[in-house]
Amino acid sequence: MATIRAMNILIVHGVGWQAGKNYARQLQTSICEEFDRAVGRLRLRDVNRRDAQAKHALRFVPVNWASVTQKPEDALIDLMGLGGRWPVRRFNLTYQARRQMVSLLGDMVAYGSGPYNKVYKAIHGCLDDGATALGDASAHERDEAGYAPLTVIGYSLGSVIASDYVWDRTRHAVRPYYLTEHHLSLKNIFTLGSPLAIYSLRGNPGADEHTLAESLDSPIQVDPDGGIWVNIHDPHDPIAFPLQPIRAYDRAGVIDCPVRAGNWLTAWNPASHVGYWRSPEVAQVIGRKLALDWASLNSAKFAARYEEAIEHFRKELKKG
């Protein structure tokens, strides 16, 4: 009997203050629902219905790296004498605003500077733990080369962290999408509300549009056999940027996918940045792609038309 192979999904949150252990639950639930609908439409006659259910076919590990930066940030506020006493601080708007700014800027400052930074290493250690869990759980599902498929979902600063992490773990691999240590192969990456394009400003004093477009190179690579990088962004989100105008990302095949994030109160304004976790459009894009990938691994009949299905999926994304 053939081994049923699940899809491994690593989720990375953004600035850490409000990231609880269940921060991704709503997105996971919505992805599962979209996956089940998409698999149903594929009419896979040669697979067991139970095996094709999302609760068996999808394996999620949400990474929580917030603890790396949260304690030092809280300590900084206390050191400066800006915290006040509880419960007064709970109702102090200045304190709440300062805490949010320290969380936002603190995470970015603490994480920067690259692999020689202890915070950078500690956060990547959290992602290592998640990748290890997925690699171990999928050990019996590896392909002939010894790898299992991995999908990464990175939100906001988490998209930067995820990109850095995959780059660090794949740049010396036999193939540029192998996370060798974990026996995982990068199939997809979905960046949500990502500020990655802003990094084109680094080391570019006085740059013009042409210089910025050519400023970044060697982005991470996904498995060329059906793999995809989708940059999901709400045009009203001031933190999110398209990536295709940066030529290195365009050449790497990144697809910018505009969506409507948030509800009627937030979808039309900057508050849309927090809406990706509950956006039906986000879940639909991810759920459909995971369904195609899972079917190609577990249905011999569908595998024969997988390439055609992926090309159709890409065209739909590009249409917006």
Image (cartoon, rainbow, N blue to C red):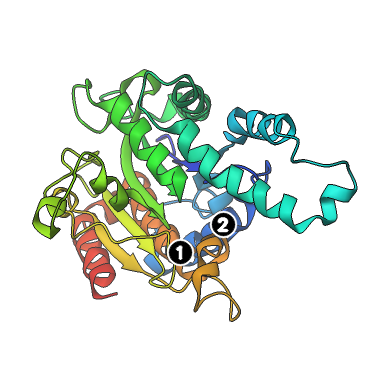
Name the amino acid type tagged 1.
Val
241, above or below 135, in the image: below
Question: Residue 22 versus residue 315: which sits nearer the camera?
Answer: 22
Residue at the outermost front position? 81
Name the amino acid type tagged 2.
Leu
| Quadrant in the picture for residue 308 | bottom left
* Quadrant of image for the C terminus: bottom left
- Helix, strand or loop status at disc 2: helix
Number of numbered discs visible in the structure rendering: 2
Please name the residue shown 45% across and 59% down the image. Answer: 287
134, above or below 43, in the image: above
Give the residue at mark 1. 282
Residue 32 placement (x, y as % from top left): 54, 57
Residue 137 placement (x, y as % from top left): 51, 28
Tell me if residue 18 can be seen: no
Real-space Cα separation, disc 1 to disc 2, in angstroms: 8 Å
| Quadrant in the picture for residue 291 | bottom left
Tell me if residue 107 can be seen: yes
Please name the residue shown 84% across and 56% down the image. Answer: 91
Please name the residue shown 16% across and 52% down the image. Answer: 212
- Helix, strand or loop status at disc 1: helix
Give the residue at mark 2. 27
Residue 60 in the figure: left or right of residue 173: right
Question: Residue 249 versus residue 48: which sits nearer the camera?
Answer: 249
Q: Are marks 1 and 2 in contact (CB under 8 Å)?
A: yes
Residue 69 placement (x, y as % from top left): 59, 32
Residue at the outermost right position? 87
Return the disc, 1 or 2, that comes first in the chain's sequence. 2
Question: Residue 307 versus residue 187: which sits nearer the camera?
Answer: 187
